[in-house]
Amino acid sequence: MKCPKCHKEVEKGSLYCPYCLSEIPWVREFNSVETLMKKEQQNRPPQKKHKFKKYLKKFRHKKRKINFSRKQIICLMIIVAILLGLLCYRQLHTFSALYSSAERQYENQNYERALKITEEALNLKPESEAANLLMAKSMEKLGDTKSAVLVLRPFVQNKTAGTAVYKEFLSLLTKEGNTTEVRDVLKYASKEIQDACREYICVAPVSNPAPGTYTSVQTLELKADYSKIYYTLDGSIPTRESTLYTGPITLKEGTIEVKAFGINDKNIESDVITRKYIIVLRTPDAPEVTPKSGDYNKKTEIKITVPDGCKAYYAFDSMPDISSTLYEQPISMPVGYHRLNVILVAANGKTSKVTTMEYYLQY
């Protein structure tokens, strides 16, 4: 027999339909108006709402049947882990992450590790000035200053480097003893870089007096903010083997061409200065002596005219020099016949010709 509601076969004698739980009428139904209306309604095609409910019920039934095996779950977890690992790897291997890691290693004095990580960072961004600087500093700590110089030189040559790069580069050159390149680099650097790296600039020494022609002996002084100054007086180029300046230099008569340079605390040499001095020492004229040569019969004083800047020396009956008697006041003419010889000595050391006077005093 079929269920009057869902039309499925049910066992004979069942009181309820096992599918829709509707009551099974075993008493024969009469074709009343009500019965006919129910049958007509049952024979109508199902509406869309009933179709949706039927589909939803079927989907839920299938969903309950889905059952993943343990192996499939493990595989899914592995795939998820790999994807997460790749994502983390990419995050940890960006330029910023690698550079930060290299900085930490450098600060912790793990220079080899810092160098390796910096190389990885530069593979992503080779033009980075900061990363190249960190690489050079790591190389320096590992004792490879030559390679560190090669890393930084292109930035300095292209004049794109910042102050930090210039300072590190100049420090490396100084350690290598390449002071000539230090001078050349700073010579053509900007004012900002020169001010920041002033400790590597060796200013040439200053001389006093100024170059020129002088009529007296001069005392030359060389001054600088450092202690080592080397010089020559013959016009030759001075070296570190030349005379070390220790105090004022006396410039005597003649033409003197002074060349000098200095060395600062960073062992950087200054430019060589050249100073030319012409010393022309004036010879004083023969001294004037009064009275004139002759015979005298009374006590008489002899006077010598001494120009400014000169000294007079005299001697009776012999030739005078600077060890003779210094004229300071009038001389009493001695009794008898005597020959007086007088010279003038200028401040520049020049000596005049001798003035000779003959006196005969009798009284």
Image: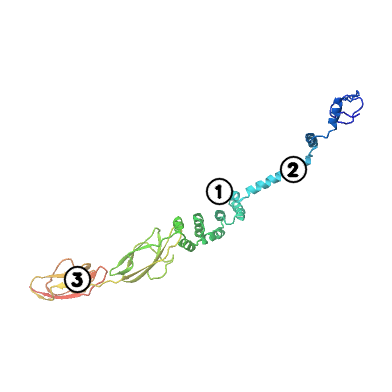
Q: Nearer the viewer, mark 3 or mark 1?
A: 1
**Of all residues shown, which one is farthest toward the front?**
33
Vertical arrangement, residue 69 with respect to residue 115, above or below: above
Could you give the CA–CA distance between mark 3 and mark 1, rounded to whole angstroms? 84 Å
What is the spatial separation of the Cα atoms under label 2 and label 1, in whole angstroms? Answer: 42 Å
Type of amino acid at the residue the image marks with label 2? Leu
- Residue 107 numbered tag: 1
Q: Nearer the viewer, residue 2 or 341?
A: 2
The mark found on residue 214 in the picture is none
Instruction: Tell me which label, 2 or 1, sits earlier in the chain.
Output: 2
Residue 14 at x, y percent in the picture: 89, 25
Lateral position of residue 142 relative to residue 88, left or right: left
Q: Are dots 3 and 1 in contact, CB under 8 Å?
A: no
Amino acid of disc 3: Tyr
On the image, the x and y values in percent for residue 179 come to 48, 62
On residue 76, the disc is: 2
Between 279 and 322, the residue placed more toward the observer is 279
Please tell me whether mark 2 sits on a helix, a strand or a loop.
helix
Q: Residues within 10 Å of mark 1 (few under 14, many from 20)?
A: few
Q: Amino acid at mark 1?
A: Glu
- In this rendering, would 136 be left or right of 355? right
In the rendered view, tell whether residue 165 sits above or below residue 305. Answer: above
Relative depth, front residue between 24 and 148:
24
Label located before the other in sequence (3 or 2): 2
Q: In the rendered image, which quarter is residue 307 located in?
A: bottom left
Answer few, some or many: residues within 10 Å of disc 2's Cα (few below 14, many 20 plus, some between 14 and 19).
Answer: few
Residue 18 visible within the image: no
* Residue pictured at 63% horizontal, 47% vertical: 91
Q: Which residue is mark 3?
A: 314
Image quarter hosting the N terminus: top right
